[in-house]
Image (cartoon, rainbow, N blue to C red):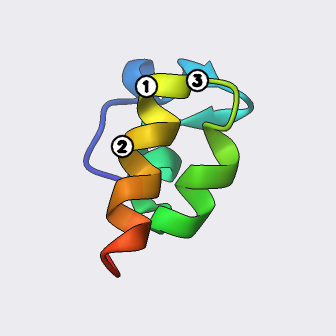
Amino acid sequence: DRFTPETLAVTYGGRHIGEVLRMSVDEGVEFFRAHSKIHHALELMQAVGL
């Protein structure tokens, strides 16, 4: 990963930033289901085939 160990030590939902950024849009839709703004943006991306 291109991130420092200190950055990678911070996690959300059991994932560090490098893992979140490597997610596909489909994975992100599921991962961020509880966060309506992020989830909605990802659903729009999913709808247009990204």
Marked residue nearer the N-terminal end (3 or 2):
3
- In the rendered structure, which amino acid carries the disc numbered 3? His
* CB contact under 8 Å: marks 1 and 2: yes
Mark 2 nearby-residue class (10 Å; few <14, some 14–19, many ≥20): few
Q: Which residue is mark 1?
A: 37
Distance from label 1 to label 3 (Cα)?
A: 6 Å
Q: Which residue is mark 2?
A: 41
Above or below for 23 versus 36: below
Task: Return the x and y of residue 18 as percentages of the image width and height.
Answer: 42, 47
Q: Which residue is mark 3?
A: 35
Residue farthest left in this picture = 2
Mark 3 nearby-residue class (10 Å; few <14, some 14–19, many ≥20): few
Above or below for 4 versus 49: above
Task: Return the x and y of residue 33 as percentages of the image width and height.
Answer: 67, 37
Distance from label 1 to label 2 (Cα)?
A: 6 Å
| Image quarter (top left, top right, bottom left or bottom right) of the C terminus | bottom left
Q: Residue 13's quadrant in the figure?
A: top right
Name the residue rendered at 52%, 39% in the picture: 39
Label 3 SS: loop
Above or below for 38 versus 23: above
Q: Nearer the viewer, residue 11 or 50?
A: 50
Q: How many marks?
A: 3
Name the residue rendered at 69%, 26% in the picture: 34
